[in-house]
Every structure is written in C-alpha cells, then in structure tokens.
Amino acid sequence: MALETVLLAVGPNDANRIDELARTVIDIAGPAGADVVVAHVFTDDEYETAVERLEFEAVAEADPDEVAERHATVRELRELLVEADIPTSVRGSVGDHGEEIVSIAGMTRSDLVVVGGRKRSPTGKAVFGSVAQEVMLEAPCPVTFVRGDE
C-alpha cells in the first residue's frame, strides 16, 4: 500500500505535543513523499470562542478551514512541516471530534491518521471517553497514536 496522504488530527489539547506530532509525521510522510492534511476539529463552543478570539466578523461568516488555518497550534505544526519540505494543507471542521476526524479521513482518502493523546486509566476512558480510541476503532485506515510527555 502506497502512503500518499497522512491526516494529522489536531485538537484543543495538542499545543503541548507539537514537537512529538511534527516529528512523527515528518518521519512517516517525508520518506514516503506523502502529503499531509492538518485537521482541526472544533466543538460548537470551541468554534465560537476561536472565531471571537481570531476576530472574525461573525460566526456565520467564518469558514472552518480558515479558522483552523489561523489556529496557533495548526500554524506551528504547518510551519514545522513546511520547513521539512512536506506538502501540507489544512482542514477545519465543527462537530464531534472523533466523528469529524473519521469523516475527514474518508473525505481526504487518507492512508494513515496520526492523532495525539495522553495515557488514561481504563476508568478514565470509560467515564470520559477517548477521541483517540474512537478514531482508532472507526477510521477507514491505520492510526498512529502519539503520546505527549504530560
């Protein structure tokens, strides 16, 4: 199987994992010559907050792709990937994190999804759920999990 498209899913807690995520994606996509899609999924509340913080005129006038492109974590990751000569694009989406990541993986025909997370106890996963776990179980392609140092 050729690796043509890697989806790097970025969430609200990934600011402290930027180096690990970038390193992983560069190590995988670089040698394969794959394109990387950096995707940021916002809940409705996260989206409204981001639109206000980024000083868009109104939520209705904001485009999720543009909001994602202007998000600090996405910008930093994209800069690191571009410095490594990795072709990169950005996608934004609003909705349930796990469902939207899986949907974007399908729409972009991704060959691999890279998602960050932290170690959680079985009880923590059962009570609070896990976006990474949902993506691993539902994605249409393999998933690489990158654990941060927190």
Image (tube, rainbow, N blue to C red):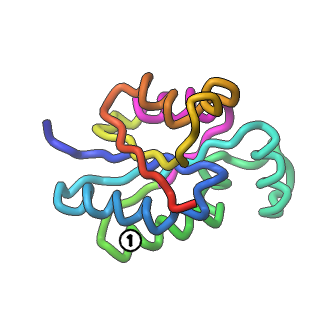
Q: Main secondary structure of the magenta part?
A: helix
Answer left or right for 29 relative to 64.
left
Which residue is pictured at 79% across the width and 54% down the height? 51
Which is more toward the observer, 50 or 119?
119
Image quarter hosting the C terminus? bottom right
Residue 28: x and y in percent read: 25, 56
Residue 123's x, y, as percent?
63, 28
List the single residue furthest toward the bottom: 83
| Residue 124 on the magenta span | no
Residue at 51% across, 27% down: 134
Residue at far left of view: 1
Q: Nearer the viewer, residue 13 or 127?
A: 127
Residue type, numbered disc 1: Val
- Measuring from the top left, give residue 112's x and y in whole percent: 32, 40
Work out which quarter of the rendered image holds the N terminus and state it: top left
Circle 1 sits on which residue? 82
Q: Position of residue 88 (x, y in %)?
A: 39, 59
The answer to which image quadrant residue 56 occupies is bottom right
Is residue 92 within the magenta segment? yes
- Give the image quarter of residue 80: bottom left
User: Which residues fall within the magenta stretch?
Assistant: 90-107
- Label 1, secondary structure: give it: helix
Q: Is residue 61 above or below residue 141?
A: below
As rendered, which of 127 and 62 lies closer to the eye? 127
Q: Badge 1: how crowded within 10 Å, few (<14), some, or many (20+)?
A: some
Which one is nearer the viewer's eye here, 79 or 97? 97
113 up-or-down from 89: above or below: above
Place residue 96 in its image quadrant.
top right
